[in-house]
Amino acid sequence: MNVLSLFNGMNTGRQALENVGIKVEKYFSSEIKPYAIELTQYHFPDTIQVGDVTKWRDWDIDWKTIDLVLSGSPCQDLSAAGKRAGINGKKSSLFFVFVEILEHIKSLNPNVLFLQENVGSASKLDVGIMSRALGVYPVMINSSLVTAQLRNRYYWSNIKTRQDGMFGDIVTDIPQPKDKEIFLKDILTFNKKYVKQINSDLIFYKNNEIRIKSNNLTGYDIINDYDCINLAFEVSKTRRGRVNSLKSPCLLKANEPLYYFYNDLFYRLNKIELCRLQGFPDNYCDIISENKSASLLGDGWTLPIIEHIFKFIQK
């Protein structure tokens, strides 16, 4: 296949194709983060970097040869964690650049396949706009089925579709993957290097959740690092123990560490644990820093989910 990956990030699409045995002839990547490009070229040196997605008309690509277009357009304006500017917000409106590119390729190759992913907390209005633009409604799949994190995402694709409802709407027909029953405790390393000291007098339990007195918020807040938005679990007190976030659907953002609590100690998730949460090998991000790894993994795709979707290309 010849593949064009927009908002390529850490190149999960290419790795998923490789893992399911689909041969890639040419892989074009549109990405602007230097450390994302560095990680991509480290694992797949033959990746062709084409640059800023908004300058796609200048790219040197034989458009009619593209077989698959991948897009994980920015979610910041769609997410419940953001300001809810919506699909027309400054960042999330880049979705429409993907639509322009896809329509251009379709005019030359009507059989081109595509996959678009976005955040599960997007409003119904925005999901409807995106679905009508793509001509297909999405399927929602939670990464908790294949990894140790709760991460609901919409996936729009024509790889496998069916007609649904009175009006025969086209919907993405990717079935749910089998639950692998992976728990948070299964992926943790309990590395003492990442222990964070928090005054135990500030901690209490409520409704089986660990809570902490916050100096910046009234009352009590779910445990975080005061200004962080991520939720931490106590491993021994949760049945599933999957990583979740209270206010953000994202795994984490750069400089916003996520913690877990075990045997009266708070641990910050380390690079190995973050890779495991997204289904990557422990050493996948070894060449870049902790913060850069966290940024890419937090914004990225869950590898086993993309593998699951791509298996239907072969079928």
Image (cartoon, rainbow, N blue to C red):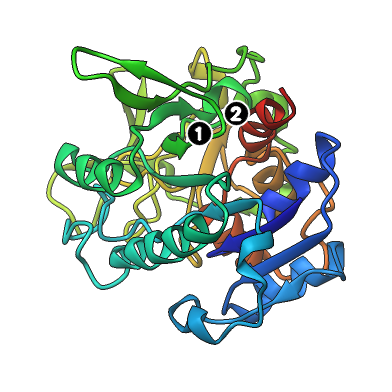
SS state under label 1: loop
Q: Amino acid at mark 1?
A: Val
Q: Is residue 293 visible?
A: yes
Residue 129: image x %, image y %? Answer: 21, 47
Q: Quadrant of residue 60?
A: bottom right
**Front in this rendered view, residue 230 or 301:** 301
Residue 93: image x %, image y %? Answer: 28, 66
**Front in this rendered view, residue 63 or 118:** 63
Q: Is residue 123 above or below residue 81?
A: above
Q: Quadrant of the C terminus?
A: top right
Residue 238: image x %, image y %? Answer: 49, 17
Q: Earlier in the sequence, mark 1 or mark 2?
A: 2
**Front in this rendered view, residue 94 or 158:** 158
Q: Amino acid at mark 2?
A: Ala
Marks 1 and 2, how far apart at CA? 6 Å
SS state under label 2: loop
Residue ID for mark 2: 148
Residue 287: image x %, image y %? Answer: 82, 69
User: Is 174 left or right of 263, judged from the image as shown?
Assistant: left
User: Is 31 left or right of 26, judged from the image as shown?
Assistant: left
Label 1 with label 2: CB-CB less than 8 Å: yes
Q: Is residue 19 above or below residue 300?
A: above
Q: Is residue 196 visible?
A: no
Residue that extends furthest to the bottom in the rendered view of this protein = 58
Residue drawn at x 25%, y 51% as measured from the top left? 214
Q: Quadrant of residue 155?
A: top left
Residue ID for mark 1: 243
Residue drawn at x 56%, y 25% as measured from the top left? 235
